[in-house]
Image (cartoon, helix red, strand yellow):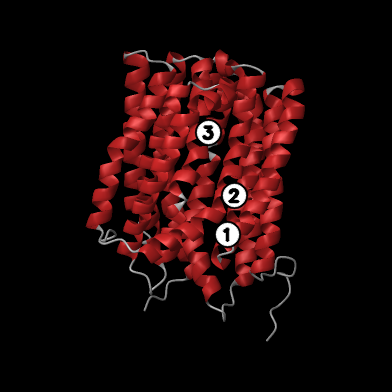
Amino acid sequence: MSTQNPVLKLFRAAGAYTVANAFNALVPFLLLPLITAAVTADDYGVYGVYISAVNMLVPFAALTIERSTSRAFVDPKIDIARYVTSAIVLISMTTTIVLLLVLLTRRPVGEFIGFPAMWLPVAVLGGFFRTHLTVLLAMLQMKNWPLAFGAMRISESGITGGLTLALVMVWGLGWRGLLLGHVVSLALFYPIALTFLRKLKLLGWPPKRAYAHDAFRFGVPLIPHIIATVFIGMSDRVMLAKMVDFADAGVYTTAFQVGLAIFLVITSVDKAFMPWLFAQLADEANAKKRTIVVGTYLYFAFLLCLVGVSYLLGPPFVAVYLGDDFQRAGELLPWLVLAFAFHGMQVTMVNYVYFSKRTGLLSIASVAAAITNVSLNLILIPRYGMYGAAWSSSAGFFLAFLISWFFGARLVKMPWFSFWRAPKA
C-alpha cells in the first residue's frame, strides 16, 4: 500500500499537468504573431465568433459526456467500456438531431450572430469530433496519466497550428483558413481517439441503454450551465461584432487568447484536484477538510496575483509581441485575466456540486450570471466598446463564482469560515 502523502501527490500531479498544458499552449502562442501577420483583425473576429458557436452547440450535441464518463470511471458497479460506448452512441444520435436543426435555421442564426451561414454546420461537426478527443483526455486524466494526456494535447495543438499556418500563409485563405485548420485537425483526431480508447479497453460492445440513459440524465441538467457559461464568454465577441465592428472583435479575441495563459493554471489544477477531492470527500472520516479549505484560499489569492502581473506586464508585452494593429489588446488584458481568475475560482467550487450529483443547480448560477453579463454588455458596449465587454465578462464570472460557492458550501459541509479553529475531538 502506498504511503505517499496525498497532498504531495496532488501537487506532483498538478505540476505534471501544468508542464503538459504549458507545452500544449506554447505551439499556438508561438504561432500567433505569424498568424496575426497573415490575417486581418476582421478575420480574427470571424474566427472568434466561430469558436463561440462551437462552444455553444457542443453541450446540445455532446451532453458533456466527458463529465459523466469520468464520474462512471470511479463507480465499481459500472462496466466503463460499455458505458463509454453507450455515451458515444448517444451523442452520435444527438449530434445528428442538432446538425439537422442547424441546417434548417442556419440563415437566420447566421444573420443574427453576424457569421457566414454556410459555415455553421461545420461548427457542429467540429464539436462532434472534439468530443471524442475530450473523452479520451478525460479517461487519461482519471487514470492519472498526465504524460499521455500531455502528448495527446501537444500533438493535436501542433497539427492544428501547422494546418492553420499553411492555410493562411501559403494559401492565403484568411478566416476560412482559421476555421478549416481547426475543424480538419479535429477530424483527423477523431479516428485516433477511438483507436486509443479501444486499445485502453475503454470501448465495449454492445452499448447498454441504462448507461446511455445515465449519461443523458447527467448531461441534460448541465446544458443550461454550459450554455450560460459559454454565453458569458461568447456574448462579448458576438455583441462587439454586431454593435461595433469585426475589427474590435478581432482585437478583443486576440487579448482573450493571450489571457488564456491563465487557463494553464486553472485546467492543470482542476485536472489534478478533481479526482483527489472526490477521494477525500468520499471518506467520511477524512480529517483534511481544513487543509483543503486553506489550500483553496491560497489558490484564489494566487489567481488574483496573476491579475496584478498582467496589469504591469501585459500592455508592453502585447505591444512588442503582436504589433501595432493589436496594441489595444494589451490594455484589455488585465480585465480579461480578472474574468478568467473568477472563472478559475468557480471551477474549483463546481467540483463540490459534481460530487453531490446535483448538476442542475449549476444551471441556476450560470444562467443568472449570463443574464447579468448580457445586460451589462447591452449597456456598456455602445458606450465603452470592447472595454465595456471586458468589464461585463468580469462581472458575469464573478457572480457565477459566488453562486457556485453558495451551492457547493450548502451541499458539502466544509469549514469555509471556521478553518482556523481546531477540529473537535
For the point 53% across and 43% down, which residue is it? 263
The residue identified by callout 3 is 52
Q: Amino acid at mark 3?
A: Ser
The residue identified by callout 2 is 225
The residue identified by callout 1 is 359
Residue 415 falls left or right of residue 264: right
- Say which quarter of the image contains residue 125: top left
User: What is the crowding at mark 2: few (fewer than 14 residues within 10 Å), some, or many (at least 20)?
Assistant: many
Seen from the viewer's position, the closer of residues 66 and 297 is 66
Tell me residue 276's x, y (percent).
49, 65
Marks 2/1: CA–CA distance: 9 Å
Residue 314 vs 265, above or below: the answer is above
Q: Where the C terminus falls, by quadrant?
A: bottom right
Q: Where the N terminus falls, by quadrant?
A: bottom left
Q: Are marks 2 and 1 in contact (CB under 8 Å)?
A: yes
Residue 296 visible within the image: yes
* Local SS, label 3: helix
**Earlier-in-chain disc, 2 versus 1:** 2
Tell me residue 297's x, y (percent).
66, 58
Residue 146 visible within the image: no
Q: Amino acid at mark 2?
A: His
**Earlier-in-chain disc, 3 versus 2:** 3
